[in-house]
Image: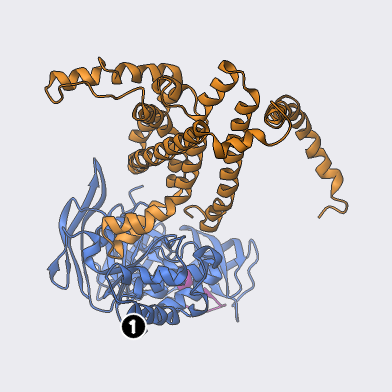
Chain colours: A orange, B blue
């Protein structure tokens, strides 16, 4: 369309340049510099990375992180799907309140929420007190400072992040499709499983990736609710660098985290084309 | 399948969407519910389908009451407004859906799907996704999907409204041919009077939630019961007058300064009654020099437009402005603004209608 193409595009590039430079100079470059430490300290080479294969602590941390992130993702998706579905089916008025209820937790500091969970879950916390008072249990349950506590806190934090992408996909689904399916003789369950669920899958995939990536690098919630006993990658890195001053070892793990996230995103970008294939709901 | 509605009504809070609809549709009839938006036609269709619960009244299919049955039990086919094709399924999967939910075996299902796609000439597109098809093709898929399980009753909710004019005309032909071929009961909802007239055996005209008149298209056009029907179905001139003379089968109606000779028809119009005459534009003739007619009126052309097959002309007369339609082929005169002409119409041309235009 444009004979020489470039002059017109060059204008857009010029607009992008300031943001691009800012990101490169103050964000990407420092990160790369820090990550490169993993190849240079304590000595040049892949020594730090060898320890993924040999060091039990590294392996355990990676396993724990993967497991917690995985469980968190599954639970947040299940709860989030139910919420998003209810919001989609609700009346216009009710929907506004629902969305507000989903968003409010996002505005409360993650630190406050983590400590709130400690108050609820600890040995003399509200839940244990109530259960013991009701005579359901004799000894307080170990609800916090372990994986269970971390998962509770993280799922709570992640549900809104799971709801929002799923909700936007669900709201694009033409409600007439469900009516049509019922008119064609489908029961409510068949309408859901054959029409609604497949059409909402792009949102589920997007939510899964978002929550999983977020969970992998989570720091505050696991640090508080894990009580230092269950270490996830982010806390492990902080311990290596701040407490043990082992920069090379710590940044190696950081590199592993960054690569994992990029690979997940890369895989996702292939799946996300499916959404275009389906055309969302229309 | 015969369908009967007894006093079917629906109101939302204080708003009455449908007011006691009574209707009987015989087997194999093509019935159209015609009305402007908000007339309740879609609500009636939705109640027949079972998507909307009536406030009162009953629905019978083949003598069996289905008022309380959920839609999936009623066994009708339906073409939805905007088609409602499943975007994640291919054309064949879309058409197979009603069979699949009925638990039909795969081999039989595939055969039926093929048959349905053949019926609408879309077999070549079986593996495409709906969004890869044109609007007209999507419409045909929707039709195939509605007919594939051979329902005795097919409901059509504004099936052609999303298509452009030419395609709409084409699909009207196809829909009518299809109805003749398979001989099932079709119930169509539309606001397009041309579509209603060209497709249907029977038309129910609705306004403000009430069925105003039910009948064959010709009967509705020729004998509109009310002003609304005459106005909605085609165009008409309305002449309010008073009956001044009643003789054998004929009336003398005083409209302004003119005494109009009018056949009495079925209308009961005693001496002194106020009546409204509906006079179709094409039933007014332009008289030649010395030609006579039951009613004659001097007129002056105000404006005119050429429509190919004919002219649409607005004239000014002693009775106010009138609209007339004149065939362009062998037209008695060439329209020109300001031209003086003589109009004439027979005593049978106009119809006495009830004035229901409250607005």
Q: Is residue B126 above or below residue A2?
A: below
Identify the residue at image location x=57%, y=53%: A273
Q: Chain of mark 1?
A: B
Q: Is residue B112 left or right of residue B344?
A: left
Identify the residue at image location x=38%, y=57%: A195
Residue B96 in the magenta stretch? The answer is no
Question: What secondary structure is marked by label 1?
Answer: helix
Rendering quarter of residue B201? bottom left
Direction left: furthest residue: A135
Direction front: furthest residue: A54
Q: Taking the image as drawn, is residue B275 in sight?
A: no
Rendering quarter of residue B231? bottom left
**Mark 1, other Cα within 10 Å: few <14 / some 14–19 / many ≥20:** few
Residue B282 in the magenta stretch? The answer is yes
Q: Is residue A20 left or right of residue A163?
A: right
Camera-side residue: B346 or A121? A121
Camera-side residue: B2 or B284? B2
Q: Taking the image as drawn, is residue B144 in sight?
A: yes
The percent coordinates of residue B241 (x first, y second) are 34, 58
Q: Is residue B1 left or right of residue B142?
A: left
Q: Is residue B349 above or below residue B19?
A: below
Q: Which residues are magenta?
A: B281-292
The percent coordinates of residue B305 (x first, y second) are 61, 65
Camera-side residue: A200 or A211? A211
Q: Is residue B142 above or below residue A244?
A: below
The percent coordinates of residue B262 (x first, y second) are 34, 70
Q: Is residue B163 above or below residue A221?
A: below
User: Badge 1 is on which residue?
Assistant: B182
């Amino acid at each position: 369309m444009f004979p020489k193409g470039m002059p017109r595009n060059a204008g857009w590039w010029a607009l992008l340049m300031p943001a691009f430079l800012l990101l490169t100079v103050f964000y990407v470059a420092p990160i790369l510099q820090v990550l490169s430490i993993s190849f240079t300290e304590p000595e040049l080479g892949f020594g730090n990375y060898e320890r993924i294969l040999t060091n039990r602590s590294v392996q355990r941390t990676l396993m724990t992180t993967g497991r917690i992130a995985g469980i968190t993702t599954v639970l947040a998706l299940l709860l989030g799907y139910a919420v998003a579905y209810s919001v989609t089916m609700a009346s216009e008025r009710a929907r506004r309140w629902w969305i507000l209820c989903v968003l409010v937790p996002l505005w409360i500091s993650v630190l406050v929420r983590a400590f709130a969970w400690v108050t609820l879950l600890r040995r003399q916390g509200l839940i244990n007190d109530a259960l013991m008072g009701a005579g359901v249990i004799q000894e307080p349950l170990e609800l916090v400072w372990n994986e269970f506590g971390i998962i509770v806190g993280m799922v709570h934090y992640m549900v809104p992040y799971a709801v929002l992408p799923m909700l936007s996909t669900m709201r694009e689904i033409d409600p007439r499709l469900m009516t049509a399916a019922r008119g064609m003789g489908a029961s409510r369950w068949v309408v859901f499983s054959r029409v609604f669920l497949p059409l909402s899958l792009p949102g589920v995939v997007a939510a899964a990736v978002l929550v999983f990536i977020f969970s992998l690098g989570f720091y505050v919630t696991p640090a508080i609710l894990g009580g230092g006993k269950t270490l996830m990658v982010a806390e492990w890195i902080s311990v290596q660098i701040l407490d043990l001053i082992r920069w090379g070892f710590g940044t190696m793990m950081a590199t592993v985290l960054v690569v994992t996230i990029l690979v997940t995103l890369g895989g996702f970008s292939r799946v996300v084309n499916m959404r275009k294939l389906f055309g969302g709901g229309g | 399948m015969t369908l009967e509605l007894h006093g079917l009504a629906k109101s939302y809070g204080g708003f009455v969407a449908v007011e006691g609809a009574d209707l009987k549709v015989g087997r194999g009839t093509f019935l159209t519910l015609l009305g402007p938006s908000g007339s309740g036609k879609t609500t009636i269709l939705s109640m027949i389908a079972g998507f909307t619960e009536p406030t009162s009244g009953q629905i019978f299919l083949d003598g069996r009451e289905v008022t309380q049955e959920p839609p999936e039990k009623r066994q009708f086919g339906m073409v939805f407004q905007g088609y409602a094709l499943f975007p994640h399924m291919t054309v064949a999967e879309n058409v197979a859906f009603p069979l699949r939910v009925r638990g039909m075996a795969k081999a039989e299902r595939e055969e039926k799907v093929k048959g349905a796609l053949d019926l609408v000439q879309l077999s070549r597109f079986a593996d495409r996704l709906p969004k890869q098809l044109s609007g007209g093709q999507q419409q045909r898929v929707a039709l195939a999907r509605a007919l594939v399980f051979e329902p005795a009753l097919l409901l059509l909710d504004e099936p052609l409204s999303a298509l452009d004019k030419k395609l709409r005309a084409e699909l009207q032909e196809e829909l009518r041919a299809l109805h003749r071929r398979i001989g099932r009961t079709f119930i169509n909802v539309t606001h397009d009077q041309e579509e209603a007239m060209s497709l249907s055996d029977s038309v129910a005209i609705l306004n403000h939630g009430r069925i105003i008149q039910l009948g064959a298209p010709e009967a509705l056009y020729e004998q509109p019961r009310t002003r609304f029907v005459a106005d909605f179905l085609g165009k008409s001139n309305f002449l309010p007058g008073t009956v001044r003379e009643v003789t054998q089968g004929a009336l003398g109606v005083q409209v302004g300064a003119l005494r109009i000779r009018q056949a009495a028809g079925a209308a009961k119009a005693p001496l002194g009654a106020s009546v409204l005459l509906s006079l179709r534009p094409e039933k007014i003739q332009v008289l030649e020099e010395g030609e006579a007619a039951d009613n004659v009126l001097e007129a002056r052309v105000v404006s005119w437009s050429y429509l190919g097959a004919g002219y649409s002309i607005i004239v000014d007369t002693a009775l106010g402005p009138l609209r007339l339609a004149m065939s362009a082929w062998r037209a008695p005169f060439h329209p020109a603004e300001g031209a003086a002409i003589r109009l004439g119409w027979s005593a049978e041309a106009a119809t006495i209608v009830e004035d229901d235009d409250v607005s």
